[in-house]
Amino acid sequence: LERSHEYKHVHVVYSFSKDLALNGFRIGVLYTLNEELIETMRAIGCYYGISTHTQGMLTRLIQNEAFVRSFRRENCVRLNEACNYLRRILDEQQIKYVVPRGGMFIWVDFTQLIVRSGLVSDNQISLDDELKFWKGCLDNARVYIPAGQFFRAQVPGWFRVCFSSVSFDLMTLAFDRILKWVNSCASESNKVAILSNPAPKSTNSSGKPHSSSNSNKNDNSDSQSSKIADSSDDKPLCKYGSQCYRKNPEHFKQFRHVHQATDQCKKNEK
């Protein structure tokens, strides 16, 4: 107290929401030695007053030190389990994220799932692209994940995913919905691309049909493509076509991808 004048601009603000899981109560604490600030807070206190019963309950709660220690210990264990569960989901889908050191959120990079509008050079994601993805998750997947721009993020494409307020089943359901919506959008986009870009007729540089030698070459490549496709005919065709973003080897074992066979043929021709 003798040095209180040195700390009049230091204020401690604390909330019961996070540490004690009482976010619904909307109650916090302000500790300050600044008399002017205290008087100001008293003057506007009538607008955010806390009931006497609530104050009494929370006072008794924090006075029970044994309970608080036990609660925080158990809370840390459960938060760690929830965090690891969400990380397993992200790892399985090969979605990048920042490994958290604490807290209740994971900073997730949804760049590979966001459709580019082309407004930014080098095929980068714009803030509008990020906002459209956020709105799409909300309107179509029915999942709310705050976009990075809401928190002044410097790079578009990052989202803050909370793992502390939902069960493991709900986390799984949320990502299933998001990926299902993203895949459906990719599937529709692929269909439009196929319809709007019919394959041109085979001609040479003079505009005439290819010679017999070229035809033989094309026949060979077609035959090679057929062999590649035939080798996996027993597998169903991936419904996402060339828009498939999956990298999991198990996915390629279950579904065949025609565009990969075409790419392989082009390499062989070279």
Image: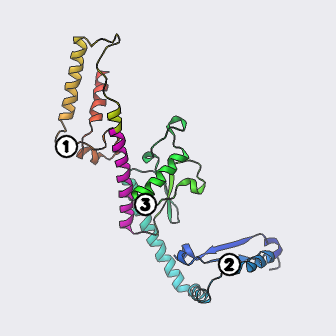
Determine whether 4 is above or below 265 in the image: below
Q: Residues within 10 Å of mark 1 (few under 14, many from 20)?
A: some
Residue at the image position 24 percent from the left and 40 percent from the top: 256
Residue 248 against residue 228 in the figure, above or below: below
Residue at numbered disc 2: 47
As for residue 171 lying within the magenta part, the answer is yes
Vertical arrangement, residue 90 with respect to residue 197, above or below: below
Rendering quarter of residue 40 = bottom right
Counting residues from the N terminus, which is met first, the one under dot 1 or under dot 3?
A: 3
Gap in Å between the C-alphas at discs 1 and 3?
A: 32 Å
Is residue 222 shown left or right of residue 133? Answer: left
The residue type indicated by label 2 comes to Tyr
Q: Indicate which disc residue 235 carries.
A: 1
Query: In which quadrant will I find the C terminus?
Result: top left
The label shown at residue 205 is none
Q: Measure the alpha-carbon separation of dots 1 and 2.
A: 66 Å
Q: Residues within 10 Å of mark 2 (few under 14, many from 20)?
A: few
Query: Can see residue 109?
Result: no
Q: Is residue 180 magenta?
A: yes
Q: Which amino acid does label 3 sit on?
A: Val
Number of numbered discs present?
3
The disc placed on residue 143 is 3
Check if mark 1's residue and mark 2's residue have beta carbons within 8 Å.
no
Q: What stretch is highlighted in magenta?
A: 166-191
Q: Which residue is drawn at 34% across and 39% down?
A: 190
Tell me residue 213's x, y (percent).
Answer: 23, 12
